[in-house]
Image (cartoon, grey):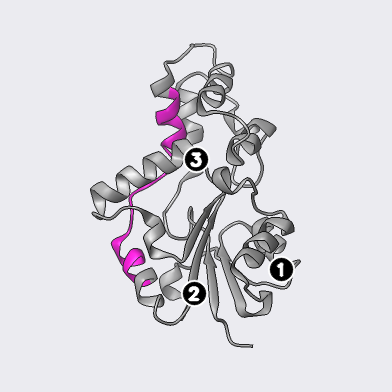
Amino acid sequence: MDIKNIVFDLGGVILDVDYQRTIEAFKALGCENFDAHYTQAQQSGVFDDFEVGKIAPETFIESLRNLMPKDPREEQVAAAWNAMLLAWNLEKIDFIRSLKSRYNLYLFSNTNIIHKTHFEKTLREQIGIQPLDDLFIKAYYSHEFGKRKPEPESFQALLNENQLRAEETLFIDDTIQHVEGARKIGIQAIHLVSKSILELGL
C-alpha cells in the first residue's frame, strides 16, 4: 500500500548527533564511566524518567552531578549533556519542507526539555526558523507526550491520535530497537544507519 504518512525521528535523522561527545564531556568533568549509564543503545532509569517528563530538569542535573567527584556547576553539566547535539543541516530542513506537499509529516523524538531548549535555540541561530514543529503536522517529544520509543503503545497512541493507518505509515529512525517497536504494530520502518535521509528516494 502507498505511503501517506512519514514519522521522522529527530536525533541522528534530521539533527546530527554524536553520543561520544557527551561521554567525553562527562569524562572531562570526572565521570569516567558515563557510558555505563547512557549510550544510544541503552540508558539507566533516570534518563528514561527524564525523557517522559517524570522528573524536573533540576532533579536530572543533580542526579548527574552525583555521578561526578568534582562537583561541577549546573551549567557545566547541562553543557556536557548538550554536547551530543551537532549543527543543523539546512539541506535536510529544506528536504523535509519539500515532502510536505506529498506526505503527512510527523516527528517523534525521545528527548527532554534541556535538549529541546538547546536545539530550538541553535535552530533559530543557524537556520533562522522556530519552532521545528512548523515542519510537521505534529511533533511528538517524549517528555511532553509522556511516552517514548521503542514501546509499541507509544507508536499506537500517535496513530490513534491522528487517525492514521499503520500500513500507510513509514517511520524513519537510526536506532534499531525503535524501528523494531514500530514494526510490531505494522508500521513500515527504515533503520537509517549509513545513509542520510537525503538518499532515501522519498
Depth check: 91 or 122 in front? 122
Q: At which x and y percent is residue 114?
A: 45, 35
Q: Report which residue position mark 1 lands on.
A: 183
Is 93 part of what is drawn in magenta?
A: yes
Is 171 part of what is drawn in magenta?
A: no
- Outermost residue to the bottom: 1
Mark closer to the chain start, 3 or 2:
3
Q: At which x and y percent is residue 177?
A: 68, 56
Q: At which x and y percent is residue 97?
A: 35, 71
Q: CA distance from mark 1 to mark 2?
A: 19 Å
Q: Report which residue position mark 3 lands on.
A: 20
Q: Is residue 88 above or below residue 93?
A: above
Q: Write the start and end of the magenta stretch as one range.
A: 77-95
Depth check: 191 or 149 in front? 149
* Residue under the point 48% across and 61% down: 138
Pair 1/2: label in front: 2
In the image: residue 184, left or right of residue 93:
right
Q: Is residue 139 above or below residue 198?
A: above
* Residue under the point 45% across and 24% down: 77
Helix, strand or loop status at disc 3: helix
Depth check: 65 or 195 in front? 65
Q: Quadrant of the N terminus?
A: bottom right
Amino acid type of disc 2? Asn
- Using the rendered view, name the quadrant where residue 197 is placed: bottom left
Label annotation for residue 47: none
Label annotation for residue 104: 2
* Residue under the point 66% across and 66% down: 160
